[in-house]
Image (cartoon, rainbow, N blue to C red):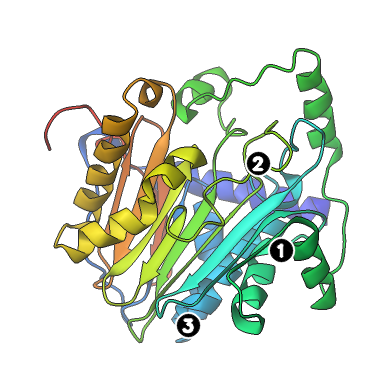
Amino acid sequence: MSNRRQFLQTSLMAATALALPRGAAAGGIDAKTATSNGARVVSTWDFGVGANQAAWPVLAKGGSALDAVETGARWAEGDLCNSTVGRCGYPDRDGVVTLDASIMDGDGRCGAVAALQDIVHPVSVARRVMERTPHVMLVGEGAQQFALQQGFVKEQLRTKEAEQAWREWLKKSEYKPQINAERAAVKPGNKENHDTLGILALDASGKLAGACTTSGMAWKLHGRVGDSPIIGAGLYIDNEVGAATASGVGEEMIRNAASFLVVELMRQGRTPMDACREAIERVVRKRPVASKTLQVCFLALNKHGEVGAFALHKGFVYAVCDAGKCDALLESRSVYTGKPA
């Protein structure tokens, strides 16, 4: 299994490197879908390529957007080994790995779990919450109890690598999250602090769905919950308009009901990219000083298949997949500069 995972990760890194377009700094994307059946799936960050590749076969066969996003998120939670998502996630400052996830259908149905321990696929538990309970969110011990009742199996999630990183962190116990561009300059691919998989899909029937999954900020206070499991903050979907997801420092998404804001801006007529940009501007106006040292990223997909993304700082990458072709695109033009669009 470890060899298979290493192969998948190596293949993903190679595919991502090939997919990054030259001259990305000069261009953005807000393109209409050109697929044979109208389906499209988009995901945050470079590991979104693998998530999209896992989700695409569902859409290619005419399957639902909801099934597709769950499949893509499960890949990130189980097959990918990343310090910010799923089984390889870094723990909190007490050494405990806790997972958050949400899933939402375009008809308004949604489910979420937060601070879930020892369950590999929180996104699937979130879907069970949506489909089998009258609630939207379960947390902590209650979420785990529900998962076990639903047939999920407990598994120790803290890997040797994560434990080693945690014990190294304990030597100084400094909590200084860095924006992804700064971290990449020090250690390429180092995204341990606040990167999330957000995945959005449009299926052949024109319906939308999305999912969000994360292990949260490394070294967070035990019990801290970010935006990923909070509907309207880390994820929001509406078949009448479009879908949005967020990544970065979750507290900023919660303060601004950010993903809901992006969808509502699209409802008012903005393109996905313009909606993401305006949401970034809202964050900056409210907390101009804090905005200099934190990352906030938005990814949106409207009901026509148009895609847009915007980030507060450089370094945000997202992946697009349609007609079986999956690319990762660096949105360096779509970075907030403080100047009018």
Specify whether 256 is left or right of 24. right
Could you give the CA–CA distance between mark 1 and mark 2, rounded to whole angstroms? 19 Å
| Residue 121's disc number | 1
Specify whether 293 is left or right of 186. left
Query: Residue at coordinates 81% horizontally, 14% vertically from top-left?
Result: 171
> Mark 3: which secondary structure?
loop
Query: Residue at coordinates 71% horizontally, 43% vertically from top-left?
Result: 223
Residue 190 found in image quarter: top right
Query: Residue at coordinates 26% horizontally, 69% vertically from top-left?
Result: 33
Q: Which quadrant of the figure contains the C terminus?
A: top left
- x, y percent for residue 133: 65, 80
- x, y percent for residue 76: 63, 56
Neighbor class of circle 2 (other Cα within 10 Å; few <14, some 14-19, many 20+) is few
Which of the pair 162/38 is nearer the observer?
162
Name of the residue lying farthest toward the top: 172
Query: Residue at coordinates 57% horizontally, 32% vertically from top-left?
Result: 189
Residue 263 found in image quarter: bottom left
Neighbor class of circle 3 (other Cα within 10 Å; few <14, some 14-19, many 20+) is many
The amino acid type found where label 2 is placed reads Arg
- In the rendered structure, which disc, 3 or 1, sits on the residue that comes first in sequence? 3
Could you give the CA–CA distance between mark 3 and mark 2, rounded to whole angstroms? 33 Å
> Mark 1: which secondary structure?
loop
Residue 23 found in image quarter: top left
- In the rendered structure, which disc, 3 or 2, sits on the residue that comes first in sequence? 3
| Residue receiving disc 2 | 224
- x, y percent for residue 319: 42, 53
Instruction: Let me know if residue 227 appears in the view.
Output: yes
Could you give the CA–CA distance between mark 3 and mark 1, rounded to whole angstroms? 19 Å
Q: Which of labels 1 and 2 is toward the front?
A: 2
